[in-house]
Amino acid sequence: MTRTATRQLSREALTLVAGRFRVLAEPMRLELLQILGRGERTVSSLAEAARTTGPNVSKHLRVLEEAGFVRRRQLGNSVVCALADRTVFELCDTLCRNIRGRLLAQADLLTPARPVRRQPLP
């Protein structure tokens, strides 16, 4: 769904897109994706890095896996997780640039205007 797209998405396609956005609307899931962006991790390692519990991480990983953002594999007694779709970072970068621009524009509105220094007449 780019600005240059010439066709409209069907209601079904829009529903799929909205579902992916819903998955990303949870800060803990974004944090887990951010951690996995640096490489594979076990569930316990993810829980430690995110300062939360293993069951909480597992719950969020299941949602991320169903949406196609994460893949999991069994390695002995551990479950190892990896990023399956790096495009999420492009989306986050775009959103962060937009948020930064909006915040800077708002900050400019709050910055008092500097008085104009006039040169003395000769």
Image: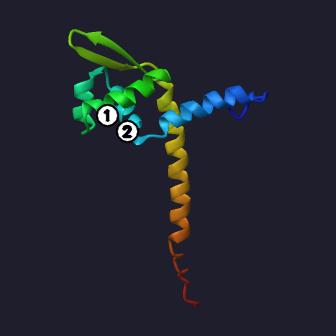
Which of 2/64 is in front?
64
Q: Tell me how far mark 2 sits from mark 1, CA to CA.
A: 9 Å
- The residue depicted at 34 percent of the width and 26 percent of the height is 36
User: Where is residue 23 drawn, in percent x and y?
Assistant: 49, 33
Front residue (pair 61, 85): 61
Q: In which quarter of the image is residue 16?
A: top right
**Viewer can see residue 1:** no
**How far across and down, in percent of the image, does residue 33 sit?**
39, 30
Q: Position of residue 84 (x, y in %)?
A: 44, 18
Q: What residue type is labelled 1?
A: Asn
What colour scheme does the image use?
rainbow
Quadrant of the image containing the C terminus: bottom right
Front-lying residue, 40 or 76: 76
Label 1: which residue?
56
Q: Name the residue under label 2.
A: 28
The extreme top residue here reads 76
- Residue type, numbered disc 2: Met
